[in-house]
Image (cartoon, grey):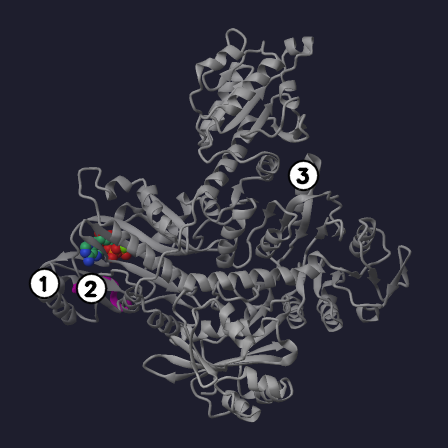
Amino acid sequence: MTAAHPSLTTAEALLADGTTVELRPLGPDDHRAVLDLHAAGMSEESRRMRFFGVSRNAPAQAADRLCGPSRTGVLALGAWAGDELVGEADCELLDEPSRTAELALAVADRWHHRGVATLLLEHLVHAARAAGIRFFEADTLYGNQAVHQVFADLGLPVRRHHARGEVRIRVPLDEGDEHYRSAVDERGRRADVASLAALLRPASVAVVGASRREGSVGGTVLAKIRQGGFAGPLWAVNPHAREIGGELAYPSVSALPAVPDLAVLAVPAGAVPGVAEECGEAGVRALVVLTSGLGPQEAGRLIRACRRHSMRLVGPNSLGLAQTDPAVRLDAEFGGAFTRPGTAGVAVQSGGVGIALLSRLTWLGIGVSSFVSLGDKYDVSGNDLLQWWEADGRTDLALLHLESFGSPRAFARTARRVTRTIPVLTVDAGRSTAGRRAAASHTAAAATPTVTREALFRQAGITATRSIDELVAAAALFHAQPLPAPRGAVAVVSNAGGIGILAADACAEVGLALPELPQGLAELLPAGASVRNPVDTTAAVTPVELTHLLRALEEEPAVDAILVCLVPTALGAATGEDPVRALVEGPARRRVPVVAVLLDQQVPVRYRSCADGGVLPAYSDAVAAARALVHARDRARRLAEPPSAPVAAPDCDRQAARSLVDGYLTAHPGGGWLDPLSTADLLAAYGLPLTTTVWVRDEQAAVAAADGLRGLGHDAKVALKAYWPGQVHKSAVGAVRTGLATDADVREAYREFTKRFGAELVGAVVQPMAAPGLELLAGVVQDRVFGPLVVLGLGGTATEVLADRVARLAPLSERDLTTMVTELRSAPLLFGRHGGAAVDLAAVRSVLTGLSLLAEDLPELVEADLNPVIVRPDGAVCVDARVRLERRPSFDPYLRRLRRPAAAGPAFEEE
Ligand code: ADP
Ligand code: MG
């Protein structure tokens, strides 16, 4: 076998210290490099210690074993830094029945303690699992602490057997998955943060392409960095100028007196790849590319330069970035926005939105910890920043305006974790709806109308708003006030009855509860006041009375939040007894969050400073205040939920599914719909209950198959369905015949198909008729932002009419299995509340579980549509399933690797 094993892929990934290495399968061309690694790269002692399995082999033998023509069944993966092979991990199947492979590992001495071995192992585990290997075995020397540590840290269970000074290590690859994933996640997070330090905390910066020309991008950024008081050395690079703005300019990056951590590029598009390469050669650690308009060629070269030289990249088409930490003070953007130091992390895709957002935050008084304009996101994405803010110790609020967040599957997982620590708010522009590709299947089309992206964001833990105004309104509340209790019951107070009613309506409309309030509160207020919720204090209320009321409401157990709605009154103006004084002269921080709605306020939201030094968000409109409160309540609910474990894997045959998918995509590189038999095999591998489906190519075979099914004791009747590749809805075109009782019926039906579909007809499937029950649809669709979603809904002919369905991000948790069912409007039908018997809910859960695992394991699965799944008190059976596959470089969210953006060209593309 000279071709690399298909389960081994090429990827770039980060080491523990943030360095990028390339991982690729070793092949015959790498003989020399393997020899060098083992001979020159390692001392005698490390050869003795680090090798196992092949420990007694000389370097030459190792090179032959891994790269020579004789190698068979070896999975060998190398880690490269530029042209240097810095480490190697391989495994070789030892024992076929037990699927045990012997593992070997070698890392160049210079590269020890940087996580090379662990990274290689993770990728090898991934490839080995895909190749059906179930155990790794390795012999290590007893005293080899380093290797024992690698295994202890890996996250998989390790069994050790001691014998004669050696330790035989055995690692089962299919156990302890969640633990392993957490360990991988944690390493990924650390490496990511380490790699971003050069971008967000650089010690020195160069602006390349800075020019003297008034208003030039480079010149502006240079001036802003200087004015911002950047703490470290700052250099200008420009071949045509000796001096810029009073500072010496250097002709090239290599001519600089020292190597900058960060280079900001403002050169013409055509020059970007060359400059990036030069920066990489010089040892620059990170790039911000402000230039826009790069062609595909330039894009590809830029990304490759970054990966090869281990540089993280923001942009291109970025407005720049800002870091307000007093120890750094880097203002490297040309948006003209002034960012004051604070605790909000801000990332935007579009520069214009960035400027708008920053200026509003600044005006409001919310400071920024770091700001990044991500531009075209060739490398650094929203995911990276979430992880940075999670760890930077300065950020307590994250604001994103992005069209996508990086690799969808990684995003969903990262977001779920990060949002447990800090609130993440985003604008859901709603440009793309779940399952945009729709049209071709029920499930995909079905996901669109009713499944709001807002709900999916909520599932990821993210607060999704509909506009920048709403984002800022919510941020104002999150930043200044405590979260309400998860119940989120609001007391609405106003000094004008009609206004109070409108505010109460606004609260009710967003789903906030307005509890009954104790009558005793009336004693605190002027005569004629009403303390039903909304509380009408009457216009005669004095600041003192209002103060007492607020204090009482704050202590009231039925109240989780207070919304105070005030209109200025002539009375208040005349006496100086403006009730707003009760708000600003009291504390801003109370047991429950307080928001003000001030109807005479000219701006949508602003802060009012209070006596305790805190601030109270004041809105000009009750609807905005209510929406902010409901976002806070939703976050409180989310935090109150105990984490729910992901669904556990039942017995599924992953290897069969994997080889089916690989086989199909080899034969159909363009992807497409699986034929009925392959569909049946794939579903069977995940325990999905497709009814017996017999494939036939002519009338005679159809009759025989029907007889056979009857012989098996099925219902005497069968269904016959015509098949041709590319078919969409079968029954609509007369391709489904159900309830066929006799041979003659089957014959007639097949003849009819032949007549109707002519040469198009390829064959048909024969199925037993399933007993009637409730028809559900279940499936998987891919969302551009969120990755795979599992969908459940009312199916069969009712699908489009009733549009009753729910969707969840895969992987599903145990709780999702329950709430998906209960959230359906037709849930009472499933629970048997309408006279019928309850259906087998365990069977429904098992279908959802199977789909979740399918979605998780197979990124190539772009659509799965099970419609209908007929559910009954005694089980569930699917009678119609369609599956579409597309080749996509396998992106396992648990495999640490850098994203490959589409812009870099098809050979370098992903998700
Ligand atoms: P399509 O969705 O492409 O029109 P289906 O195979 O789903 O075709 O068939 C349409 C409908 O026929 C199903 O929703 C179901 O009500 C009924 N049906 C199809 N096959 C069977 C079967 N094997 N047993 C019972 N009912 C069936
Ligand atoms: Mg159908």
On the image, numbered disc 3 is attached to which residue?
Answer: 366
Which portion, as a residue range, is magenta? Answer: 750-760
What residue is shown at x 70% (from left), y 63% (from top)?
286
Disc 3 marks a residue whose amino acid type is: Ile
Q: Which mark is residue 713?
A: 1
Residue that protrudes farthest toward the front in the picture:
164
Beta carbon at label 1 within 8 Å of ligand 1: no
User: Whereabouts is ligand 1, in terms of quadrant?
Assistant: bottom left
Q: Residues within 10 Å of mark 2 (few under 14, many from 20)?
A: some
Q: Could you say whether the residue bearing mark 1 is in a helix, strand or loop? A: loop
What residue is shown at x 56% (from left), y 51% (from top)?
403
Disc 1 marks a residue whose amino acid type is: Gly
Q: Is residue 584 left or right of residue 497?
A: right
| Quadrant location, the N terminus | bottom left
In space, the residues marked 1 and 2 are separated at their CA atoms by 12 Å
In space, the residues marked 3 and 2 are separated at their CA atoms by 62 Å
Name which of mark 1 and mark 3 comes first in the sequence.
3
Q: Could you say whether the residue bearing mark 2 is in a helix, strand or loop? A: loop
Instruction: Please name whichever residue, 163 or 696, is drawn nearer the observer in this view of the structure.
Output: 163
Q: Which mark is residue 692?
A: 2
Q: Tell me where residue 486 appears, x and y as whole percent.
A: 46, 36
